[in-house]
Image (cartoon, rainbow, N blue to C red):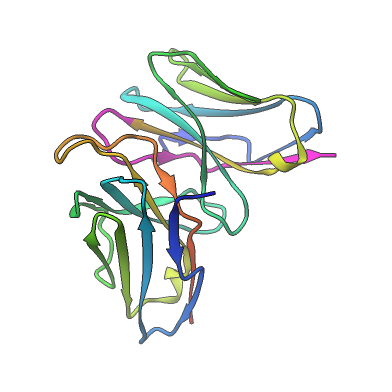
Amino acid sequence: DQQVKQNSPSLSVQEGRISILNCDYTNSMFDYFLWYKKYPAEGPTFLISISSIKDKNEDGRFTVFLNKSAKHLSLHIVPSQPGDSAVYFCAASGQGANNLFFGTGTRLTVIP
Amino acid sequence: DTEVTQTPKHLVMGMTNKKSLKCEQHMGHRAMYWYKQKAKKPPELMFVYSYEKLSINESVPSRFSPECPNSSLLNLHLHALQPEDSALYLCASSQQERQGASPRNTIYFGEGSWLTVV
């Protein structure tokens, strides 16, 4: 059973605009959430994370928002750049766990 | 740039071959992982090593045999694989302050080894 879901398999955005990638989870024990970026033929690269005690974390052009009541998180990329084109995975873990539960990924294409 | 290094990047092996995938990290992480990723699927956990001891085996078939020779190295020995085992094999690591403590949840991945079984 998929505990982390990314319902949009793909997203296309114009360069310079905002990209919003969404993720939902079902397990209320998850307390740490991460976003990874993956280029073809490479391993996932850690991008940004957020703990459940926060509702927002920002790092440069990347901001992650967490809505615990809705069990929803989102990644905002502003402004989007062609180099951001990749597959983005959200992942979640619970306290004491040493595994990440991944979503199925969203392929972002930033159009120049 | 990833600080988790995997070799080889590509491997083609027959079903009767014995081969190994290797992984090295120099971040001082004491938790190391093997994940398997098929096309258009998320990574799936196979094994976790904590302080060089196997702590999680996610019901992986015995034709996959992990080994952690020291705190920086992690191997995955392959024998008698099936074509359906063809995938991207990802090594990863994370911090773990002390044995028995939970590893940090931020896991850093290598670039992966593409395995094709023919």
- Horizontal side, residue B46 vs residue B5: left or right: left
Vertical position of residue B5 compared to residue A93: above or below: below
Q: Magenta span has A97?
A: yes
Residue closer to the observer: A91 or A63: A63
Provide residue B39's location: percent of width, then percent of height.
55, 58
Place of residue A106 in the rendered image (x, y in percent of width and height, measured from the top left)? 61, 40
Could you tell whether A29 is left or right of B69 in the image?
right
Residue B63 in which image quadrant: bottom left
Quadrant of residue A8 within the rendered picture? top right
Taking B54 as reference, is B21 left or right? right
| Residue A4 image offset from top left, x and y in percent | 45, 34
The residue drawn where x is 27% and y is 66% is B61
As for residue B10 lying within the magenta part, the answer is no
In the image, residue B44 sits, relative to residue A17, either above or below, namely below
Q: How many marks?
A: 0
Give the residue displayed 62% in from the left and 50% down from the top. Answer: A39
